[in-house]
Image: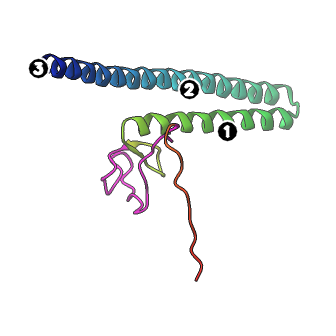
Amino acid sequence: MSFFDDAVSGAKDFGSAVSKKTGKLVDTARLKMNAADITGELNNRYKALGKAVYDARKSGTDIDGIIDECVKSIDALNERLDEVRRKIAGMKNKVICSSCGAAIEPRSVYCSRCGVRMEAGQKKARQPKDDVPAPEVITVED
């Protein structure tokens, strides 16, 4: 009977591992689609900004307010895209180069894309675990 129990237990463990890996792949794919959507929206905003500047130059109108709004929205989209890329890198156990934004191996000394020396204290881009409570900080006074 114990052989059968061991086989069932092993099959359950295998199924659980496959389920976790599949979930991770689905999450990564979802994040990549989100990044592609944000990139598409960024391209649309850049085109709109360029067209507005061109039309304003041709007509001689002042559109500083519109330009400021466009720049703010582009900056917000870039921040969202950076956050999504950090999450993707964290799921792949990579670090993000602070200079060019490339995802590289955590033990790399230099960035493989831009060549910048990686900072000594740069940590792996990890996602916080929801099910693990934060460690309690205890201070001791003498």
Left or right: 125, with 46 as reference point: left
SS under mark 3: helix
- The residue lying furthest to the right in this view is 61
- Mark before the other along the chain sequence, 2 or 3: 3
- Residue bounds of the magenta highlight: 104-130
Q: Residue at x 48, y 51 (%)?
A: 98
For residue 113: magenta? yes
Q: Which mark is residue 107?
A: none
Say if the magenta span includes residue 22: no
**Where on the picture, by quarter, is residue 141?**
bottom right
Among the 4 quarters of the image, the one containing residue 12:
top left
Q: Position of residue 40 (x, y in %)?
A: 58, 21
Label 3 to label 1: alpha-carbon separation:
60 Å
What residue would you read off at disc 3? 3
**Mark 1 nearby-residue class (10 Å; few <14, some 14–19, many ≥20):** few
**What amino acid is at disc 1?**
Asp
